[in-house]
């Protein structure tokens, strides 16, 4: 990951967790949201 | 009014009060994620197109009948409907004896447990979910741990970072690579039951 992410985290001591997940993990790569949703459903059951 | 700037719930309220164009904005906003999910499961664009259409027909029907109750979680609700539509598709396909290893992304349907013709949607869903949980075991220890802490234990990334003694950024990076690797495994059709 580039430094921009780290800088953002340093500036924001208590970032919203879901927002972090969305921004740092799911964005920019096709198909990751689908895997995320499948995992959510799989561990819910 | 620029509908594109409104939240999902605001658009839903506008749609419910009679402005049909609001639903078009919602569909377009979430089209890619819903379609990608269906496509990942069925691995066939034409089938995915059909299921996508059926999903939103149901979505609209449910909204019109006042059955949307999950305030603030519209996308998750739509994906759950899409997920159920996919399961219906697999079940129907199995019943028609048209499922073969080559034309579905889910080899699980060829498992002997599903060959008795009495499959219920819930069983299919549980089988898919079991496959996904088993795939997690193929990840590295670090990636598996972050998946389990997040999805099974419901921990925040701050908590995960503290427990694994890494930075939040590292925990996020591990999660990202875990999802990328899982996606690769799903694409390579390694979701075969033991």
Image: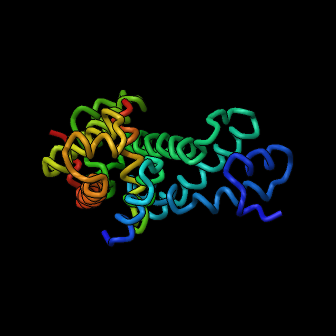
Q: Position of residue A11 (x, y in %)?
A: 43, 60
Q: Position of residue A19 (x, y in %)?
A: 48, 52
How was this image coloured? rainbow
Residue appearing at x 23%, y 60% in the figure = B188
- Taking the view exactly as shown, the residue that stands out farthest to the right is B18
Q: Of residues A9 and A22, which is closer to you in this image?
A: A9
Residue appearing at x 71%, y 63% in the figure = B4
Q: Of residues A4 and B13, which is closer to you in this image?
A: A4
Q: Please give left or right for residue B20 compared with residue B189 in the image.
A: right
Quarter containing the N terminus of chain A: bottom left
Report if residue B131 is visible in the image.
no
Q: Position of residue B132 (x, y in %)?
A: 28, 43
Q: Please give left or right for residue A18 compared with residue A32 in the image.
A: right
Quarter containing the C terminus of chain A: top left
Residue appearing at x 42%, y 32% in the figure = B121
Q: Please give left or right for residue B132 compared with residue B137 in the image.
A: right
Residue appearing at x 74%, y 51% in the figure = B11
């Amino acid at each position: 990951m580039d430094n921009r992410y780290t800088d953002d985290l340093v500036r924001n001591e208590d970032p919203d967790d879901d927002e972090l997940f969305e921004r740092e993990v799911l964005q920019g790569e096709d198909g990751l949201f689908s895997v995320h949703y499948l995992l959510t459903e799989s561990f819910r059951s | 009014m620029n509908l594109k700037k409104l939240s999902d719930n605001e658009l839903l309220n506008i749609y419910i009060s009679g402005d049909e164009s609001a639903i078009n904005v919602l569909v377009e906003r979430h089209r890619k994620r819903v379609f990608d999910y269906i496509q990942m499961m069925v691995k066939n664009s034409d089938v995915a197109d059909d299921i996508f259409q059926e999903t939103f027909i149901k979505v609209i029907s449910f909204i019109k009948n006042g059955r949307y109750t999950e305030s603030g979680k519209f996308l998750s609700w739509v994906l759950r409907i899409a997920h159920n539509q996919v399961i219906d598709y697999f079940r129907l396909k199995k019943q028609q004896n048209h499922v073969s290893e080559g034309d579905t992304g889910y080899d699980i349907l060829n498992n002997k447990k599903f060959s008795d013709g009495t499959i219920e949607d819930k069983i299919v869903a549980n089988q898919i979910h079991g496959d996904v949980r088993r795939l997690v075991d193929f990840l590295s220890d670090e990636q598996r741990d972050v998946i389990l802490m997040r999805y099974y234990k419901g921990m925040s990334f701050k908590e995960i970072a503290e427990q694994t003694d890494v930075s939040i950024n590292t925990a996020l990076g591990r999660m990202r690579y875990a999802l990328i690797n899982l996606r690769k495994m799903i694409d390579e059709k390694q979701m075969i039951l033991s």
